[in-house]
Image (tube, rainbow, N blue to C red):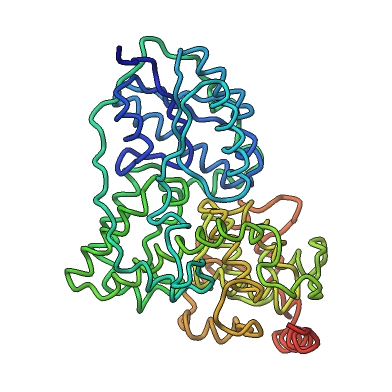
Amino acid sequence: MTDKSPVIWWVRRELRLHDNAVLQACLDMDRPIVPVFILDEVFETYGSCPLWRFGLGAETFAKTLEALGSRLIFRRGTALDVLRSVMAETGANAVRWGRAYDPDQIARDSAVKSALVEDGKDAASVSAHLLFEPWSVKTKTGGFYKVYSPFWRAVKDVHVGASLPPPKSLPAPDAWPASDNPAKWNLAASMNRGAGVVKKHLRLGEDAALARLDLFIDEKVHDYKSRRDFPGEDATSGLSENLAWGEISPRVLWHAGQRAMDEGKNGAEHFVKEVVWREFAYHLIWHTPHIVRDNWREGWDAFPWNQDEDTAEVLAWKQGRTGIRFVDAAMREMYVTGQMHNRARMIVASYLTKHLMSHWRIGQTWFEDCLTDWDPASNAMGWQWTAGCGPDAAPYFRVFNPVTQLDKFDAKRVYDTTWIAEGNAAPSETALSYFDAIPQSWALSPSAGYPSEPVVSLEAGRARALSAYSNRDF
């Protein structure tokens, strides 16, 4: 007889119907599907902003499922305990979830799978988060790639299968298990007053993600390569927020980029390269999981970075009051929108790790708390890449000059005035919103004035960094 007991769809970073391989795996079993989101032991460790943003995304996705005659069951607790409980309540003997690649999620998933299989359950992960499984992309000698460019060359011509269509309905169980009310979790609490400011800039859900993609391909992708580094321009897709939480799949982005390339849109290949940059981050986090918390390159453990995040210099960096306008504008953009322009991220990270000689882990952890598009692989690789201890073909002693970078990429100071209010007779709404978003304990206001001198001058910071590099035996 055909088993018609329900299958549990353990919903995680796949908040979508289009191109959802986990959902398709559940549909292929021809059983009732019970979608379950668990605020589990890994999610509980996420920073304030990403966890809040994911919660909002999950609530949005719940409405999408309701339109198909389904539901999203919300539970809070240890993943294994919750899954066992829901399976007992529903009579389900199978569970499927999207495969993870970072060490914390791998440890959780391995323990869950082993325990459920021992219980006699059918438990398995499905590839739904990446274009290429990390172990499937190999060098000629069978190893993994440590530099992006050859990784790109290895995958750029690989066939990527067509995206999966969204289902028109989901088979429901005879009876639904009880669900928590996610609003009562109050995930916005740790955001304090910043939640109200950042929420205005969110684009929640799959429909918003697909609309963003259509707009980008139609109007922006042609000039993407030439304009993407200018933070004062609306030249990027803005999709990192949606991609981080699985509201759109990398395969949908890949195929959209490929179609744009076929249509002769100049920036399309570079857009696809950025999608593959994310793949490279996951390639590294899977092969070298120490990249999350330890220096990726050997020989950096004794480097004399400041590891005290309570110094005046680090506080000035966090507050966006270093006196270096590109750095400060970028930090303020993050507090108001939950995101930061990619060029600005590089400048912000370089100033912290090189001019301020502070450990990249301080910045990595701060971003993990403040970004709506936080991603464990991209965040770890990005910080180490900029700090010099990560996977970068460029010399580790490269020190970006944020003043000349601002002159080059924001010559008319559009980005600057969008985010810095002090000294401006008629500051923008976005610049003033910074003071509404930041902790009240900082006691900052537009009338306080902008710093007259940098917390560390570019000349002194650069000299200090180069001296540290010259005295190290790498």
**Residue 192 in which image quadrant:** top right
Residue 426 position within the rendered picture, expressed as x and y whole percent measured from the top left: 52, 68
* 307, 173: nearer the viewer: 173
Q: Residue at x 40, y 59 (%)?
A: 238
Q: Residue at the spot x=55%, y=62% of the render? A: 284
Number of marks: 0
Q: Nearer the viewer, residue 134 or 196?
A: 134
Viewer-proximal residue among 128 and 238:
128
Q: Residue at coordinates 46% horizontally, 35% vertically from top-left?
A: 97
Q: In the visual, does 164 lie left or right of 286?
A: left
Q: Position of residue 374 (x, y in %)?
A: 55, 53
Tell me if residue 252 can be seen: yes
In the image, is 80 to the left or to the right of 339? right
Q: Residue furthest left?
A: 263
The quadrant of the rendering that contains the N terminus is: top left
User: x%, y% of residue 459?
Assistant: 72, 89
* Residue 150 horizontal/vertical position (percent): 43, 75
Q: Is residue 139 left or right of residue 270?
A: right
Residue at 45% x, 17% y is: 92
Kindly tell me whether residue 429 is visible in this rendering: no
Image quadrant containing the C terminus:
bottom right
